[in-house]
Image (tube, rainbow, N blue to C red):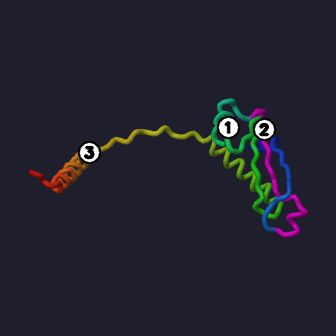
Amino acid sequence: MNEIREDIRYISSRSSGSGGQHVNKVSTRVTLIFDLAASPHFTEAEKERIGQKLSSWITKSGIIQVSCDTSRSQHRNKELATTRFFAALQAALKKEKPRKAAMVPEFVKQKRRINKLANSQKKELRKKIIF
């Protein structure tokens, strides 16, 4: 992860929200920029997987952008953006287990058939007999 940190760039900009005059003067929003397409740290398969999972964060040129402006501190926003980025990378690279079809027990099938039969008989008794 440390070698990935070397390829991360940060851009600061003015943030919106609370803070009064402080917001208008200081650039506290931090945008983390990571060039996934040019990164030597991931294989092509991993890049494809990350691209699918984090598609809302990736530009057309393959650059991941994560913005954070929740705190009034630029330093804290930088930490939050970095944490969010690495958590998203870990989640994207995690392999999902293949789903196994559930085996429905025979007694459950029997119970369903009995309930269907009971419902159909109940509805049959409700019908009016017309001569």
Label 3: how many residues lie within 10 Å, few (<14), some (14-19) or many (20+)?
A: few
Q: Quadrant of the image for the N terminus?
A: top right
| 95 and 26: which is toward the camera | 26
Which residue is farthest top? Answer: 44
Q: Are marks 3 and 2 in contact (CB under 8 Å)?
A: no
Whole-angstrom CA distance, mark 1 to mark 2, is 12 Å
Which residue is farthest front? Answer: 131
Mark closer to the chain start, 3 or 2:
2
Instruction: Tell me the amino acid under the disc marked 2.
Output: Asp
The residue stretch that appears in magenta = 19-40
Q: Where does residue 35 sit, x and y in percent of width and height?
A: 78, 38
Is residue 37 a member of the stretch shown in magenta?
yes
Q: Viewed as shown, does residue 90 lie left or right of 128? A: right
Residue 35 is tagged as 2
Instruction: Tell me the amino acid under the disc marked 3.
Output: Lys
Label 1: how many residues lie within 10 Å, few (<14), some (14-19) or many (20+)?
A: many
| 95 and 61: which is toward the camera | 61
Mark closer to the chain start, 1 or 2:
2
Mark closer to the chain start, 3 or 1:
1
Q: Do the residues labelled 3 and 1 touch (CB within 8 Å)?
A: no
Q: Please, what secondary structure does the residue beneath circle 2 have?
A: strand
Q: Please, what secondary structure does the residue beneath circle 1 have?
A: helix
Whole-angstrom CA distance, mark 3 to mark 1, is 43 Å
| 71 and 128: which is toward the camera | 128
Is residue 66 a member of the stretch shown in magenta?
no
Residue at 32% x, 43% y: name it: 104
| Residue 106, picture quadrant | top left
Q: Please, what secondary structure does the residue beneath circle 3 have?
A: helix
| 34 and 129: which is toward the camera | 129
Residue 109 is tagged as 3
